[in-house]
Image (tube, rainbow, N blue to C red):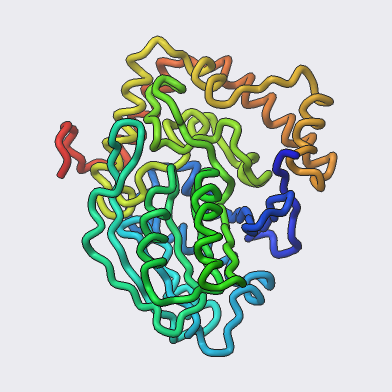
Amino acid sequence: MSDYLKKIAGPTNAALYRICPASSIERYIISTPATRKILNMPEIHGFEYTYLLRKGLENFLKTPFAAKFFADAGGGAKYSALHFLRGGLNFNFIEQFYKCYGFTKVNASFMTSQRVQKGKHWQIKHDQYRKFSLEGVTSLIAGDVIATGTTLQNGFDCILDMDVKLDRFIFFTIGTPYTEKIIGAYEKKFRKKNRNFKAYIFYIEGRFELVEKKGELPFAIDGTDLIRTKALLSPEFEASQTIASRIERCAIYDVGARAFNWRKHFRDIVEYWQQLSKSEYSVPEIYNLRHPFPYADYDEYEKAKKKIWPELSKDTVKRLYEREIKMLLRTIKLDSWSFFAQRLKFLKNSAQTIKWRNDDV
């Protein structure tokens, strides 16, 4: 059976879905206005990006579900927040737990984890800095963007070498199915230390797919780019997308650069749109490659979407369908050259002080 989403009751500013059918790993998808914004608007950068990511997490952590899930009478003493440098710093779990639950005893652990490609495989190149604070800790929480899962694998290898027995590993991610694959591969190893070990994944807005092969999509980077094509998305995120966001190179660019090196971040985005503008691809062609719409009519669309979102009302599905049709028609009518030029102008205006050159700073 294919995966589908079952909604968990809660406030509208932090929708929560359980990914079903159930597996040994509990899997969820969170959707908030703030996280939808950062995934649809890559021009948001620096602290504004970090702020919105944290705002979305805060909205979720304040839900009744999260308050019960993270409850700790010891003031957070059972938790350590593991930060994979640099992207993991954006989540700021220490402050989040204090703001939402008043916890003052949450430990912090850190490790560098920079991956490089060796042939067909990804390996960790830089992980010299490691500082773990796991004394008395039974729950480890972390967050990062996951493409192939190499960073997670490296982190688990380090933790398994330590004298620590974890009850829970809780992971927040903008990630791909490799997140589950890696965590699933390590479950048995952690259960050898503690048979009650349990892992939880909270995907942000959806479980995205990974570009696996060169040439799979125009100008996409294999082994790196998370894409929306065939992804398992929350209905809220599905409804929030724009033409531009659907034809972006990836769902999320390098978050380390996005938060801490905005010049490099903008160069990555602008380079992609320049490639599009100089290519022979039109907007409808790119849109169809990245967001195919294979439904002959509403009935086919409804049948397909009900398999993913079985609890969604007919009215909501109908609205989503009508929005899709309007966006498709608008895409067809667009002047591609003008659309690409306007997008490039907007991006360059959003980063006024960048000196457009190839070298990094």
Query: What x and y, as percent, mark residue 82?
Result: 40, 67
Q: Nearer the viewer, residue 36 or 206?
A: 206
How far across and down, in percent of the image, does residue 14 sit?
63, 60
* Quadrant of the drawing holding the C terminus: top left
The N terminus, quarter of image:
top right
Q: Residue at x 31, y 23 (%)?
A: 274
Q: Is residue 97 above or below residue 39?
A: below
Query: To which quarter of the image does residue 353 belong?
Result: top left
Pinpoint residue 250: horizontal percent, then vertical percent: 44, 35
Answer with the quarter of the image where residue 90 lies. bottom left
How far from the left and from the top, in percent, is residue 262? 27, 47
Residue projecting furthest to the bottom: 74
Q: Residue drawn at (58%, 15%), measured in percent from left and top?
A: 332
Seen in the picture, residue 181 relative to 272 is either above or below; the reply is below
**Nearest to the observer: residue 135 or residue 91:** 135
Q: Is residue 310 left or right of residue 261?
A: right
Name the residue at 39% across, 23% down: 214
For the view shown, which residue lies furthest in the front direction?
A: 192
Residue at the far top in the pictured view = 280
93 vs 354, nearest the viewer: 93
Q: Is residue 70 above or below residue 51?
A: below
Picture residue at 55% right of the left edge, 60% below the top: 188
Q: How many marks?
A: 0
